Image (cartoon, rainbow, N blue to C red):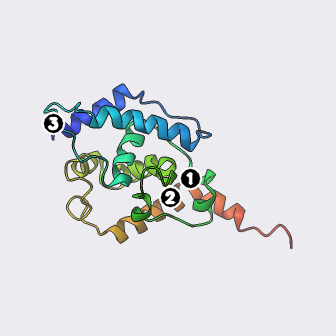
Amino acid sequence: MRAAVFALAVLSICCGGTASSPSATAETLELRGQTAHFRLFAGTTPDSTAPFANNPRWFWETVALYENGEFVNPASLDDIVRGVFPTLQQLNVDPNGGTQIYQLGYVFGDFIVWRWGRPAFLRLIETNADLRAVPGVSTAEFEAAWQSYVRQRYLSSVQSVASVDYLS
C-alpha cells in the first residue's frame, strides 16, 4: 500500500498534475505519459522496486494519465462517437503499435474512481489491475460499464445531435 500511495504522489506531484487542453494530441499525451512512467517505474518507490513494468498496459497508462490530469474529451474522438469502443485487450497492444490508450486513459481512471472510489483505484495498483479481486467484475462487465459511463457522461449531447438527419 505504501508503494502504491507513493507512486500516485510521484505521478501527481512530479508530472504536473494539471489538465491538458482538449486539443492535446496523442503524441503530447504519449510524451507526458512516458515521463510519468519513467518516474513511476524507475525505482522511485520507497522500497526501490518497480511494480509491474507497464503490464497490463491499459491500466498503467491509465494510472499515469489520470494522475497527470491528461483529459481528452471522448466526444472529440470519432471512433468513440460512432460507438466503436476498444477492448482492454486491444489497448494492451505493443507500446509502439497503438496510441488510443493515451486518448482514453484518463477517462478509464475517472470511471474507476467514480464507480468504485479512490481506495479501489489504489487497490487496483496493488493488485496489478486484477478486476476480479478489487471491484469484483469480469473484463467484459468492466468494459460494458465503462462504455455506458462514457455514453452517459460524455456522449449524450453528441449522440442526440448526431442522430438528427439533416438531409431529409
Q: CA distance from mark 1 to mark 2?
A: 7 Å
Left or right: where 78 falls relative to 66: right
Q: Earlier along the polypeptide chain: callout 3 or callout 2? A: 3
Mark carried by residue 74:
1
Q: Earlier along the polypeptide chain: callout 1 or callout 3? A: 3
* Quadrant housing the N terminus: top left
* Mark 2 crowdedness (10 Å alpha carbons): few <14, some 14-19, many ≥20: many
* Quadrant housing the C terminus: bottom right
Mark carried by residue 2:
3
Residue in the image at 50% along x and 39% along y: 29
Q: Is residue 47 above or below residue 110?
A: above
| Labels 3 and 2 touching (C-beta < 8 A) | no
For mark 2, give the secondary structure.
helix
Mark carried by residue 150:
2
Amino acid type, callout 1 = Pro
Which tag is nearer the camera, tag 1 or tag 2? 1
Amino acid type, callout 2 = Val
Q: CA distance from mark 1 to mark 3?
A: 33 Å
* Mark 3 crowdedness (10 Å alpha carbons): few <14, some 14-19, many ≥20: few
Quarter where residue 47 is shown: top left
| Labels 1 and 2 touching (C-beta < 8 A) | yes
Which tag is nearer the camera, tag 3 or tag 2? 3
Quarter where residue 3 is shown: top left
Left or right: where 98 falls relative to 25: left
